[in-house]
């Protein structure tokens, strides 16, 4: 027995020894050539223009034991990951754009693993260049200053552009864009700019030359590409002294008069240096013709008289004036010569004079109405002008000085004497509102005399006002806001219209009208709009009003403006639950919900927050403050836990909830909620089994539900399409073939104003069929026969417009469809008898009901804002709608 145990122990030791002697070798990459795209990415290079998504390499290796290997790739922390590897195939894909100019070498860590051993290697991937960069000019903007006497062929600037590419793509050559008058050349290799032709500052002081920098070209995304850029060189030519001076405003004429004395100015000449960019001072002198009678100021060029005119022997003198440049060291350089002609004339001693009916006069006045027609002669003026001198001394100009181009004077040039006529040129300038008086100066100024004698007269026009202005409001529309529940007679807004006319023509009276004006009144003189004394504003009933205000003067001229009044909501309603005591049944795991309604019109007054005030037992429920949902605490997951909370094993608990609005001040209300807690009923059947199986994988159930919905939608679309095609084929009637039969005399019923007997406000405008039956969809009246309208017994309301005639449906509409229109916030549904194609007369019935009592906010949400459409419409749209309805009804015998 002992011998057998020793043999078993020996065999076990040998088996363990053999097992531990097996070696597990690590996998390794194939070591391929540097240009290979298969291996461990050692010495791998990639062009920077390789598109993202390209498979650029395949990691390849093996495991000595033949086990399957997986590949990995990572990058150093903080560096961009340019590649991604497929773990199974080893295919490496480029996932980010490369840019050699930003990063020319990428460090990556590649790995190969057989599941037990992992070999990691660090490789460097080289990014090769592509021609994707254009040359970039240095030292921009390029501005050069060049003297105009620089010799052609000289270099004046060196342009430099840098291309970040390498090789031929980084080499740059230069050229100039050719123009017809280019005066420069550039060396294509060095970028040196030279003068080709002589520059002239006086001809062109500044040159703009466009230089093109082009690289040597290279491959980019498989194509050969050459890139270039341009820059503009501004060449400022510096003026040189190469132009003589010249006289300006020639020829020159001067005059000497009998009253002149030695030193009197005869004439002033002006010369300038031809080199205007860098001018030299000018020195003036007389060279001949002066005969000692004249002298000239060497700096100003003023020619003066040196003797008395009575000693002069000639009537005409020609003086030669020399203008020389003053160079460095006061050296006189280039010069120019011109002639000044001087004439000796007789004395001019009589100025022009204005005359009226009674002799010389310098004030002329007239009274007239504003805005005379253009071209009218102002006959109230009797003006004569006279100059007693003879010849040129008696020639003068007339000019009217005052508001520009309002009046003009005729004639404008007078010799000796003329009758003065004043003509209206711009009637808009003769406006009483701009000023009740117009003042002008009538000037008479001699033309050809050195004295330029003149005379003036005042022209005064007193204007009489006319009603030539329409009252104009200070704004096209006025916007006002007033809190609801404001007392009657509260001020809303003040409108202002201005009429610049005087007296009663400028006194504006105000009135208001329109569908929204019933609750408002206006002070006719002050334009203050206020609420009617009996009016009560309620934002929950109607929050917006708009109407027109008219401003009218004494002659009936008027203008209009529109007033928009917004009723500001006040927090005047408390939240309200449906009942004080609420009963709810709660399934464990599912919430119950309570809801309160706040009848205020706007937030935050109608925004409600919910909370639990007290509960029995305590600390069992949670409540969502926004939705009003009540949940059990998360730890209550079964009915057994519920029963163990109280000694009586209750499953019906109570709590007090509060609903509080967010207005200021805030209002709140409470309700008692009795909650009967039950456990969920187990599901039976195949669907329940399917849902139980899908609890672990909810996406399976969601997919099944989606498939069922898609099938149901598809079936619905097919059925609807088939029905539509069938109906289209059977009911295809062209507009030109529509048959409308005239109503029989027995069918025609006149619209009667119903009596006011109903007690329900919603039946104020109840309209019944002629046979006395109530309209479809309306609340039936207890009485039969003629239609009736009942008004509630409450405070008087402002009058409202009568309902318009009934609308007519198109032939394509179903006969029983009712037609609705909105008038003054009420819904209008009119019973209409339409002739059908077959001759039968179907009836379309409805009801016109005024706004009923206030409804809850949830009800208003469901109705989608149907109740007050007219507050968003201007009055013109309503009038157009009524007019269109009336025109349509005439054609069907409803007029």
Image (cartoon, helix red, strand yellow):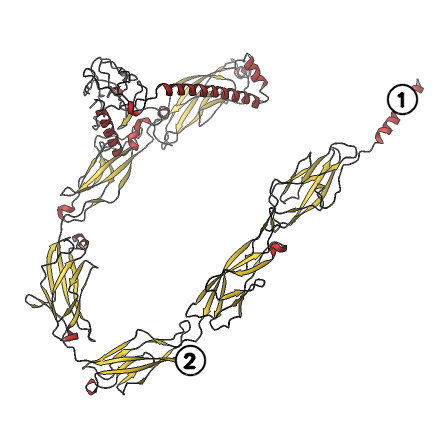
Instruction: Specify whether 16 is left or right of 482.
Output: right
Which circle's residue, 2 or 1, is located before the other in the chain?
1
- Which label sits on residue 327? 2
* Residue 53, percent from left and from top: 61, 40
* Residue toward you, 404 or 581: 404
Instruction: Specify whether 10 is left or right of 629.
Output: right
* Residue toward you, 843 or 689: 843
Q: Which residue is mark 1?
A: 8
Quadrant in which residue 420 is drawn: bottom left
Quadrant in which residue 365 is drawn: bottom left
Closer mark to the observer between disc 2 and disc 1 = 2
* Residue 857, percent from left and from top: 36, 26
Q: In 3D space, how far apart are the residues under numbered discs 2 and 1 (Cα atoms)?
A: 131 Å
Q: Does any portion of residue 95 appear in the rendered image?
A: yes
Instruction: Specify whether 343 is left or right of 236.
Output: left
* Residue 428, percent from left and from top: 19, 53
How packed is label 1: few (under 14 Cα within 10 Å), some, or many (20 or more)? few
Please say if the residues under marks 2 and 1 sit with CB atoms less than 8 Å apart: no
Which element carries disc 1, helix, strand or loop? helix
Instruction: Specify whether 96 is left or right of 58.
Output: left
Q: Does any portion of residue 139 appear in the rendered image?
A: no
């Amino acid at each position: 027995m002992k011998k057998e145990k020793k043999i078993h122990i020996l065999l076990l030791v040998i088996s363990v020894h053999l097992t531990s002697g097996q070696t597990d070798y690590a996998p390794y990459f194939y070591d391929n050539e540097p240009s290979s795209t298969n291996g461990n990415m050692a010495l791998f290079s990639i062009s920077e223009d390789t598109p993202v998504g390209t498979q650029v390499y395949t990691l390849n290796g093996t495991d000595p034991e033949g086990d399957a290997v997986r590949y990995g790739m990572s990058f150093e922390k903080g560096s961009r990951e340019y590649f991604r590897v497929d773990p199974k195939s080893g295919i490496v894909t480029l996932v980010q754009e490369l840019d050699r100019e930003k990063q020319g070498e990428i460090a990556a860590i590649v790995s190969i693993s057989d599941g037990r051993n992992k070999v990691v290697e660090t490789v460097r991937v080289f990014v090769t260049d592509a021609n994707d960069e254009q040359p970039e000019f240095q030292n921009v903007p390029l501005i050069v200053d060049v003297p105009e006497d620089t010799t052609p062929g000289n270099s004046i600037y060196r342009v430099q552009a840098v291309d970040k590419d390498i090789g031929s793509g980084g080499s740059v050559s230069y050229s100039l864009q050719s123009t017809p008058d280019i005066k420069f050349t550039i060396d294509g290799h060095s970028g040196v700019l030279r003068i080709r032709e002589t520059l002239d500052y006086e001809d062109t002081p500044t040159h703009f030359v466009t230089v093109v920098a082009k690289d040597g070209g290279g491959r980019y995304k498989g194509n050969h590409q050459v890139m270039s850029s341009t820059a503009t060189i501004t060449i400022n030519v510096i003026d040189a002294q190469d132009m003589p001076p010249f006289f300006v405003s020639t020829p020159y004429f001067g005059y000497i008069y009998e009253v002149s004395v030695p030193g009197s100015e005869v004439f002033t000449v002006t010369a300038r240096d031809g080199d205007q960019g860098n001018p030299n001072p000018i020195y003036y002198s007389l060279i001949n013709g002066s005969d000692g009678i004249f002298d000239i100021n060497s700096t100003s060029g003023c020619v003066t008289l040196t003797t008395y005119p009575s000693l002069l022997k000639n009537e005409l003198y020609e003086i030669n004036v020399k203008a020389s440049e003053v160079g460095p060291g006061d050296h006189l350089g280039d010069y120019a010569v011109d002639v000044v002609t001087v004439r000796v004339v007789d004395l001019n001693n009589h100025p022009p004079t204005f005359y009226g009916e009674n002799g010389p006069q310098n004030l002329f006045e007239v009274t007239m109405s504003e805005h005379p027609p253009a071209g009218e002669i102002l006959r109230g003026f009797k003006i004569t002008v006279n100059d007693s001198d003879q010849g040129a001394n008696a020639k003068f100009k007339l000019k009217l000085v005052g508001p520009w181009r309002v009046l003009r004077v005729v004639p404008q040039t007078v010799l000796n004497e003329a009758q003065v006529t004043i003509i209206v040129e711009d009637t808009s300038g003769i406006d009483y509102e701009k000023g009740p008086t117009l003042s002008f100066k009538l000037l008479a100024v001699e033309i050809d005399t050195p004295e330029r004698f003149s005379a003036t007269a005042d022209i005064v026009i007193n204007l009489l006002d006319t009603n030539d202005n329409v009252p104009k409001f200070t704004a096209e529309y006025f916007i006002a806001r007033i809190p609801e529940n404001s007392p009657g007679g509260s001020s809303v807004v003040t409108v202002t219209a201005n009429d610049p006319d005087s007296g009663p023509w400028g006194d504006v009276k105000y009135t208001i009208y329109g569908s929204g004006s019933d609750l408002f009144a206006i002070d006719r003189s002050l334009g203050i709009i206020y609420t009617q004394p009996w009016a009560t504003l309620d934002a929950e009933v109607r929050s917006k009003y708009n109407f027109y205000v008219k401003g009218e003067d004494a002659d009936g001229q008027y203008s209009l403006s529109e007033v928009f009044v917004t009723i500001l909501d006040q927090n005047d309603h408390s939240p309200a639950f449906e009942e004080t005591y609420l009963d709810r049944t709660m399934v464990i795991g599912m919430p119950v919900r309570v809801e309160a309604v706040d009848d205020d019109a706007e937030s935050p007054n109608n925004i409600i927050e919910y909370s639990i005030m007290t509960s029995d037992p305590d600390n069992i429920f949670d409540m969502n403050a926004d939705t009003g949902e009540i949940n059990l605490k998360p730890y209550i997951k079964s009915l057994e836990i519920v029963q163990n909370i109280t000694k009586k094993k209750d499953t019906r608990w109570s709590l007090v909830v509060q609903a509080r609005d967010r207005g200021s001040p805030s209002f709140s209300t409470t309700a008692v909620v009795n909650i009967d807690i039950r456990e969920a009923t187990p599901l039976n059947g195949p669907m329940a089994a399917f849902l139980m199986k899908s609890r672990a994988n909810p996406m399976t159930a969601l997919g099944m539900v989606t498939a069922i919905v898609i099938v149901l939608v598809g079936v619905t679309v097919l059925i609807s399409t088939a029905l539509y095609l069938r109906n289209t084929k059977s009911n295809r009637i062209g507009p030109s073939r529509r048959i409308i039969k005239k109503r029989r005399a027995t069918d025609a019923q006149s619209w009667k104003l119903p009596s006011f007997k109903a007690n329900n406000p919603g039946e104020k405008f109840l309209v019944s069929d002629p046979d006395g039956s109530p309209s479809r969809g309306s609340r039936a009246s207890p009485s039969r026969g003629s239609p009736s309208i009942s008004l509630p017994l409450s405070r008087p309301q402002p009058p409202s417009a009568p309902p318009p005639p009934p609308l007519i449906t198109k032939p394509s509409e179903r006969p029983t469809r009712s037609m609705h229109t909105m008038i003054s916030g009420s819904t209008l549904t009119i019973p209409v008898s339409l002739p059908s194609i077959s001759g039968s007369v179907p009836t379309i019935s409805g009801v016109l009901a005024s706004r009923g009592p206030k409804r809850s906010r949830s009800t208003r949400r469901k109705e989608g804002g149907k109740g007050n459409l007219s507050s968003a419409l201007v009055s013109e749209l309503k009038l157009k709608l009524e007019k269109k309805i009336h025109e349509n009804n005439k054609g069907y015998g409803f007029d």
